[in-house]
Amino acid sequence: MVQSAPTRPLDLDSLRAAAHAFARDEMRPVALSYDESEEYPLDVLRRAAAAGLTHYDLPTEYGGSGVESLSDRCAVIEELAWGDSPIFWVIAQGGFFAGPLLALGSEEQKQRWLPALCSAEPPACSVAITEPEHGSDAAAIETTATRRDGGYVLNGRKKFIGNGHIADLCIVFATVEPGSRSRGVTAFLVEAGDEGFVRGPRLPKMGSRCFPAAEVSFDDCFVPEDRRLGAEGAAFRGLMWVFDVARIQLAAASVGLGRAALELAVDYAKEREAFGRPIHEFQAVSFRLAEVKLKLDQARLMTHRAAELADTGHPFSTEAAMAKLAASEASVFAASAAVMTLGGAGYIRDSLAQKWYRDAKLDEIWDGTSDIMRLLIARSLFA
């Protein structure tokens, strides 16, 4: 049965305006400095928490603001990522962590861990899926969860895990039945201090530098049974749903980054002169930026179409893949166009254009590469 669209407990225009103001005043001015230092933007995270921007998308019964509509969330995400994409992902990690917990956890588990995400100092959260040998094929997870009296013992390694080196809370996807692929995939919540849970090392990245990624490992890590999320073997379906929602949100963030790059390029093209006139009067420049505008608007429409399908209870997996593919590639194109328009001024390290170019590339890789998105779309044609 088709569900009715979620109610909107907050005024979307006010929330979006608040997100834009925070992005403009608190994120954009420090974006380059955090990229250079690669420091974790803890001060910005705390200010975002105080402004309600770390938990606006979490249910009110756990302390959030209750913005259920994915389409509304995408509008807010675009504004925050316009300020700075990597800092946005630091701010958004609590919501990403909450996805599997809301999808798979019991009411007791939600009451246990979700309120902390809505606090003034939210914990550092991670979701550990990708492994050194298994990324796109999530059903091939090799990290094992072996039954032990009162719980499970985890063994394995995860890689490219956001916040991994500082994680206070980590949702881990492991298999209780090695070799069974999706049938054995089960989710567990691991806490900092659990014996056998090893965080780090932090991985150096080309872009998105202040949002850390790390390797985490589990060496006979005991997890009590009350920290298993859902039934044994039940996590894969929930994981696929979480991926689909995450791809739509990533698409919205990609559009925000691309929009920032386009605005920078347009402003520069108006001011920069060559051969006695502004460079936007040259067709090579203006047509390139027109193409950026076209791709970004197409991507935004696809993103909101996928979000609205999700909001109203319709199937949306294919549309999520299409939105993620279109938006991530539009973002890379926009950032590349900004560097090209600024020329040498866009290539030097004190330019946001070169930073955004490096940041945008990640969006074509994580939560499913562009190749995987094309594979999913192609499969849907012949299902």
Image (tube, rainbow, N blue to C red):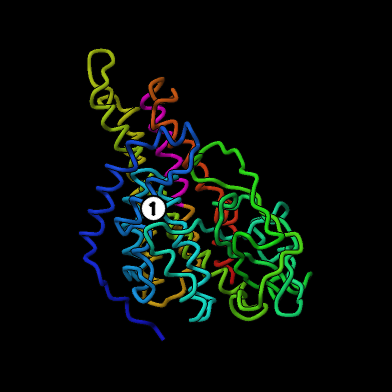
Quadrant of the rendered image containing residue 290:
top left
Q: Residue furthest top?
A: 275
Closest to the observer, 367 or 160: 160
Q: Position of residue 298 (x, y in %)?
A: 36, 52
Out of 50 and 156, give the one closest to the viewer: 50
**The N terminus, quarter of image:** bottom left
User: Residue lying furthest right in this view?
Assistant: 179
The secondary structure that most of the magenta stretch takes on is: helix
Residue at the far bottom in the pictured view? 1
Look at the image and give the residue range highlighted in magenta: 326-342
- Say left or right for 315 vs 294: right
Number of marks: 1
Type of amino acid at the residue the image marks with label 1: Ala
Residue indicated by mark 1: 299
Q: Give percent across and percent down for residue 383.
A: 59, 72
In terms of secondary structure, where does tag 1 sit?
A: helix
Is 192 or 133 nearer to us in this picture? 192
Q: Residue at x 48, y 81 (%)?
A: 107
Q: Is residue 163 above or below residue 141?
A: above
Q: Is residue 294 left or right of residue 111?
A: left
Tell me residue 89's x, y (percent): 45, 51
Q: Residue at x 41, y 77 (%)?
A: 313
Left or right: residue 65 compared with residue 137? left
Residue 143 located within the stretch drawn in magenta = no
Q: Is residue 331 magenta?
A: yes
Residue 28 against residue 381 in the figure, above or below:
above
Crowding at mark 1 (Cα within 10 Å: few <14, some 14-19, many 20+): many
Based on the displayed image, in which of its 4 quarters is residue 119 positioned?
A: bottom left
Give 330 or 215, whichever is nearer the viewer.
215
What percent of the width, then of the height, locates residue 23? 31, 46
